[in-house]
Image (cartoon, rainbow, N blue to C red):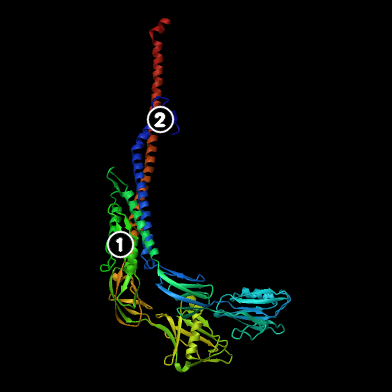
Amino acid sequence: MAGISSLGIGSGVLTSDLVDQLVAAERAPTENRLTQKTQQSEAMLSAYGKLRSAITELRLPMRQLSSADNLKAFSATSSNENIGVSVDSTKASRGSYSLNVTSLASAQALASQAVFADRDTASVGQGSLQLSVGDKVTNITIDGSNNTLQGMANAINEANAGVSAGIIDTGNGYQLVMSADETGVANSVSISATEEVGAEGLARFAFDVADPTANPDMKQTIAASDAVMEINGIEVTRSSNSFENVIDGLSFDIKETGTSTVTVSQDVGAVTDRVQGFVDKFNALQSTIDGLAGFNSDAGVGGLLTGDSTVRALQGQLRQVLTGVVPGLENANVRSLADVGISTDPKTGALEFDREAFETQLKNNPDDVTALFAEQGRATDSQVEFVRSGINTQAGKYDINVTQAATRGSLNYAAADTGTVTVMAGNRFTFEVDGETQVSVFLENAPDGSPLSGAGDDFTGAEFAAAIQQALDSSSELKAADRSVQVSWDATDGLTFTSGNYGAESNVRLTGALNAPSLNSKDGVAGTDVAGTINGQVAKGDGQVLYLGSDAGPASGIQVRILGDQTGSRGSINFVQGIGKSTVDLVNSFVGVDGKIENRTSSLNRELEKIQESQVKLDIRIESYRERLVKQFSAADSLISQLNSTRDYVTQQLDALAPQNFNKK
């Protein structure tokens, strides 16, 4: 290679330019072929990429439509802007409600009556304070390091006791103020003090929520209160100004007292827009297919994917899903997309959407429209509810038989023992609900509304059940765990605590009853799971839900909720898989990990890798060919140079022997 620049010196013909031309001529056929294959493969990859993108775009709207909840959109309005309402369409239903907010929730506030000359030096005493907020008890030590007004306020704030403390400069001195972090009667604050002998003073900060006037040195400036609202004449109480789970799917946020009319109606426009989104994405996919696989008969030219088997399979399967009658809806008022105003343009293959026709069908046949797009289980028994299907569930009709109804766990005290329940001030009832949720509640007032006395007040069984029910309904622990307990009393069954959940994990235990001598700790009786068969196969039970595993044939993975206590045949459930789920499954079969387009692009990428390998081999072969030419040309050039030298010598000798040269001599 280094001597290629000297080629042609001897011959004037075998030059480096000639080597380059011969090498180029040798490379060109193979390189042109590899370049052409590369360009073709890359163009195909680009085409499949566009097709993949267009197919994937279709998946989102169809995934939305495959959920029945998205086809039952609801909106809610309130006639009073100070009584806000939000709606969860998955749980809401049409309705109108009259609201009357009579009380807002407030947080309790306390203020010490003693005035201190200095916040950082005046001693408040030493010992300990015990703060009780709801069911939370916090002990705070006051010693030589923090026995000032500021030091005590800091200690309370750092304890995370559910209480905030501050100091007010009245102009004549300093006072301690405290407020509960959360609103509601259940978050009222009680403070007890234990004083160190010789360093008294903390008793000034004690406060008994059951007897607010017991310590004149600590005054309740704002009493804790619950929010109270009447809904269609039924009084509902919450510890905060947010009311959730009062009406299925509705939540209320109140700012002022007053009245309002809340109306819940189906948001037909929102559902129609979702269907329009599907139509738009399908037409975009059809346009992409036309551009990639269409054929221009006038020009006699087709696209890159014209005649491609993957495209043909996609179009054929989409046509089958979107134009056929949905299995299970053969006798319904809505059987196919054509019945809801979605038709196909025979010239372009695009979908045309008649929004008015769709909305009419949605209003008149909401269940059929839902089943057209989303999976739906239609039970013949009104107390059997479809929960969900599995990946392998097939459309069909499946019989249901119940051998054991689900029950809720409960705790019972005999009527003879609870006809009268004595409760004293400072009471505390602790429960374990469903085996894992710990709950503590207390009663504040006697049946006549007065504060409970230390000696105890008597409740009738019905009065006690109502009082403890209100306390449990306000429990933050139960709300956080999404659990509930119902309390009842009658002369026959006595006092009963019943879990809001069903199943073997459902139970209620009373683990402690402080200052309530009429009740003792006691274990409840666990509930039972539903048992039975679906499609003749033994199903599993979880509370009220009866379900089959993933290997149970056509009904695999189906789940139904069995309400009531009736055993035996519970009718059947007709499972309909709408076009939403079918289309999503179809899209996944093309663009998923092992999808048809993924396999095709993987094949094209392997071809490109082989082309790159062939290119490397070509470069190596051509380099070897160049080196061989240079060696051959160098040898020939050297020989020609020698021959030229010999020629020149012979010519000189002959010239010397010429006759004219002799005559000159």
Mark 1 falls on what kind of element?
helix
Numbered mark located on residue 17 in the image: 2
Q: Neighbour class for label 1 at 10 Å: few (<14), some, many (≥20)?
A: many
**Do we see residue 260 in this rendering?**
yes
Q: Position of residue 484 (x, y in %)?
A: 46, 80
Depicted 425 relative to depicted 251: above or below:
below
Depicted 657 relative to depicted 386: above or below:
above
Q: Residue at x 64, y 86 (%)?
A: 214
Sequence-wise, the earlier of marks 2 and 1 is: 2
Mark 2 falls on what kind of element?
helix
Q: Residue at x 63, y 85 (%)?
A: 213
Q: Residue at x 43, y 31 (%)?
A: 4
Instruction: Compare residues 17 and 665 and report the one nearer the observer.
Output: 17
Numbered mark located on residue 337 in the image: 1
- The amino acid at mark 2 is Asp
Residue 548 location, quadrant: bottom left
- Mark 2 touching mark 1, by CB under 8 A? no
Q: Position of residue 225 (x, y in %)?
A: 56, 79
Q: Position of residue 461 (x, y in %)?
A: 48, 91
